[in-house]
Amino acid sequence: MVEYYDNDFSFEEHQMEMEQKLQSLPSSAETAEHDATIEDDDEHVKLHPKTQAQCWDGFHTSHSTGNFFKPRRYIMKCFPCILEHCATENSTQIGRPKRLLLEVGCGSGSSCLPILKNCTESTIILACDCSAKAVEVCKSVVQSSIDSKNFGAFVSDPSLECGESDTSFAQDVKTAHMKLLTEETMITNCDDTVGQADIVLMIFVLSAVPPKRVGRFMHQIYDAVKSGGKVCFRDYALYDLPMMRFKETHTIHSTCSDSDGKTPRLYERGDGTLSRFFSLDTIRDIFESAGFIVEELRYATVFNDNRKTGERLKRAFVHAVFRKP
């Protein structure tokens, strides 16, 4: 297992340093004027799920080999509950259903692939994404790396409202799950648990969801988790390096608010995809509002060393585990 450290520096000290840096920057009269005329999120074309799906299609078309993101081998070390659920054989006993791990926002498969390589036959892994191209790339990457009959990938977007999709997210998960169940396992997986995940993996996905859609997104995730099931979460924290590098012109102004009352720290990348940065309080509010219970919630701080320049870069993430009661 790869060594991975996520407490390389003090987040509080980093926060103070970055806030002082932001305060030293000149304020923009143009931004203040724009803030007074912010259009509603529903009217903002860039914040529509279909727009974002198209942007992610473009990204994964440009990186169709799946090599843009390295395999996240640290996942199972950061989330021991995944190892407990996926790397044990006890659920293969007669009469015991297979466990289900669901990754939401799978991208090119950089998170689910390392898990698949460590899983037993007692676990089914499903991966989904709003981008059809991402799902295509994910399937290709997995199939070229490992032979697994317990893996499936499908297109679905939990942020869509009822009138925007013919099926709910929970129905999409159930359909994908049933495709992988044999006649024997179909009997042991009673109807109530088909499509209900033991673990949901959300790695750098909520930051790409338009803020006004987050509530819908999380309630649909909640419906796809078993009672007692867990959500393993990691995403960008406030004052992470990319946030500090975004130019003011890349700011997306939302009518929603974070837990501190400020507008979400939301930015548009050059390819049109979104990048949002979170505080612990905002993530707590989002998950608790959907019905989840906090088991772990903290900042993860990591040094990334740039071998070419010799520069040591500071990365900051929100790390969390939530449970459905």
Image (spheres, rainbow, N blue to C red):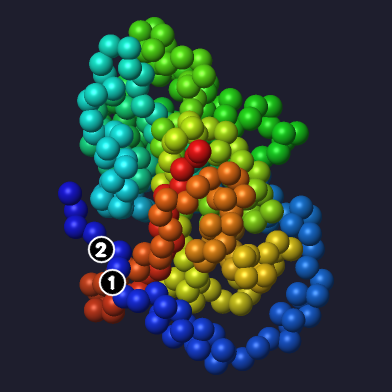
Q: Residue at 29% of width from left, 33% of height from top?
A: 86
Relative depth, front residue between 174 and 252: 174
- Is residue 60 toward the left or the right of residue 218 in the image? left
The answer to whether residue 250 shows anywhere in this view is yes
Q: Residue at 40% of width from left, 54% of height from top?
A: 296
Residue 101 position, x and y percent, is 39, 33
**Hey, what amino acid is under mark 1?**
Asp
Relative vertical location of residue 224 with respect to residue 17 in this rendering, above or below: above
**Residue extending furthest right?**
37
- Is residue 76 toward the left or the right of residue 25 in the image? left
Residue 162 position, x and y percent, is 72, 34
Residue 295 position, x and y percent, is 42, 50
Q: Say few, some or many: other residues with alpha carbon within 10 Å of mark 2 (under 14 / 14 to 19 / 20 or more).
A: few
On the image, numbered disc 1 is attached to which residue? 8
User: Where, by quadrant of the figure, is residue 272 drawn?
Assistant: bottom right
Relative vertical location of residue 39 with respect to residue 54 in this rendering, above or below: below
On the image, numbered disc 2 is attached to which residue? 5
Q: Residue at 46% of width from left, 84% of height from top?
A: 16
- Is residue 71 toward the left or the right of residue 252 in the image? left
**Residue extending furthest front?**
325
Relative depth, front residue between 287 and 158: 287
Relative depth, front residue between 236 and 29: 236
The answer to whether residue 58 shows anywhere in this view is no
Do callouts 2 and 1 mark residues in contact (Cβ within 8 Å)?
yes
